[in-house]
Image: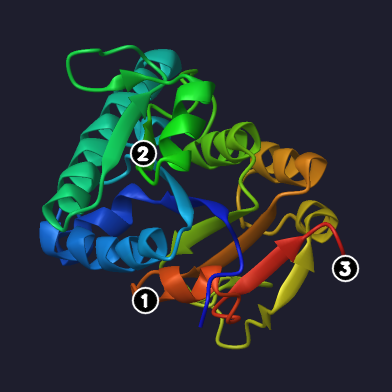
């Protein structure tokens, strides 16, 4: 199979990077994700990555802590993950750059849109850390925003389930999986694909979204080849 898309944005949750450990970074798991990414790069696909930070810190579950401070801590957690993914990619020979929305020049480049696009055009993977750089916005929203800015054709949202269901398949045995949805349906049905801000950005900028299972890392490659490995969300019904 050959890739269908030229420029993509891959969203990796922090939880997926922890593997079976449920906390921290499991580098064997991360490296397994990097192998199909390397295949995509070798095929000429330009790859941006947004990482979450839930394997270290979740701002929304921080109790009585000030929400802004808790979200800033979450942004730092995403930077740890971005550096971990970068290291795994470099270990298998992939050229990579980390850019962060909060300036920390000793460890990463500041996020500059034109520089990010230049890296992509040179065949480098660009990993975006710190979400949007603002509190109260999820890393799903960051993925949608960065995808719009770099003009990615599709967001690949790697999850622990194999697509979008009408209800939680881990709770309800009669949950029905969707093969294709529109962003309007996602918003109207309040499906937990991504938060409404992220879905609206994708809808307004005509960015496709593929939700698929990361339990088989090869799905990263197959999703770019449009092999129907998950649920495709577009503007058309």
CA distance separating discs 3 and 2: 32 Å
Q: Residues within 10 Å of mark 2 (few under 14, many from 20)?
A: many
Q: Earlier in the sequence, mark 3 or mark 2?
A: 2
Describe residue 20's horizontal placement relative to residue 8 as left or right.
left
CA distance separating discs 2 and 1: 19 Å
Q: Position of residue 215 (x, y in %)?
A: 34, 74
Q: Nearer the viewer, mark 3 or mark 2?
A: 2
Is residue 41 placed above or below 144 in the rendered structure?
A: below
Report the front residue among 19 and 98.
98
Residue 37 shows in this picture: yes
**Numbered circle sitting on residue 237:** 3
Q: Position of residue 201 (x, y in %)?
A: 72, 38
Q: Which residue is mark 2?
A: 127
Is residue 140 placed above or below 134 in the rendered structure?
A: below
Q: Position of residue 37 (x, y in %)?
A: 35, 61
Question: Which residue is pictured at 71% across the width and 63% down the height?
Answer: 233
- Say if mark 1 contacts mark 3, CB within 8 Å: no
Describe residue 202's horizontal placement relative to residue 29 as left or right.
right
Question: Which residue is pictured at 53% across the width and 34% down the height?
Answer: 142
Report the front residue among 24 and 33.
33
**Disc 1 on helix, strand or loop?**
loop
Outermost residue toward the bottom in this view: 174
- Say if mark 3 contacts mark 2, CB within 8 Å: no
Residue 63 shows in this picture: no
Describe residue 234's horizontal placement relative to residue 214 as left or right.
right
Report the front residue among 44 and 74.
44
Q: Earlier in the sequence, mark 1 or mark 3?
A: 1
Question: Which residue is pictured at 61% across the width and 69% down the height?
Answer: 4
Q: Which residue is mark 1?
A: 218
Q: Nearer the viewer, mark 1 or mark 3?
A: 1
Q: Earlier in the sequence, mark 2 or mark 1?
A: 2
């Amino acid at each position: 199979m050959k890739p269908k898309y030229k420029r993509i944005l891959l969203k990796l949750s922090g939880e997926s990077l922890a593997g079976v450990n449920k906390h921290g970074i499991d580098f064997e798991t991360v490296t397994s994700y990097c192998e199909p990414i390397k295949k995509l790069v070798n095929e000429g696909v330009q790859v941006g990555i947004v990482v979450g930070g839930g394997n270290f810190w979740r701002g929304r579950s921080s109790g009585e802590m000030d929400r802004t401070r808790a979200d800033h801590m979450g942004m730092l957690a995403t930077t740890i993950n971005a550096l971990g993914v970068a290291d795994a990619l470099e270990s298998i020979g992939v050229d990579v750059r980390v850019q962060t929305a909060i300036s920390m020049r000793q460890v990463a480049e500041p996020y500059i849109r034109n520089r990010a696009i230049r890296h992509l055009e040179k065949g480098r993977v660009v990993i975006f850390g710190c979400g949007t750089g603002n509190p109260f916005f999820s890393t799903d929203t960051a993925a949608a925003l960065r995808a719009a800015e770099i003009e990615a054709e599709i967001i690949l949202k790697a999850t622990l389930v194999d697509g979008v269901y009408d209800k939680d398949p881990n709770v309800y045995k009669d949950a029905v999986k969707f093969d294709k949805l529109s962003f309007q349906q996602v918003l109207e049905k309040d499906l937990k694909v991504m938060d409404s801000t992220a879905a609206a950005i994708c809808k307004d900028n005509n960015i496709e979204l593929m939700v698929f299972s990361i339990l088989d890392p090869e799905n990263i490659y197959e999703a770019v080849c449009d092999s129907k490995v998950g649920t495709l969300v577009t503007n058309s019904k």
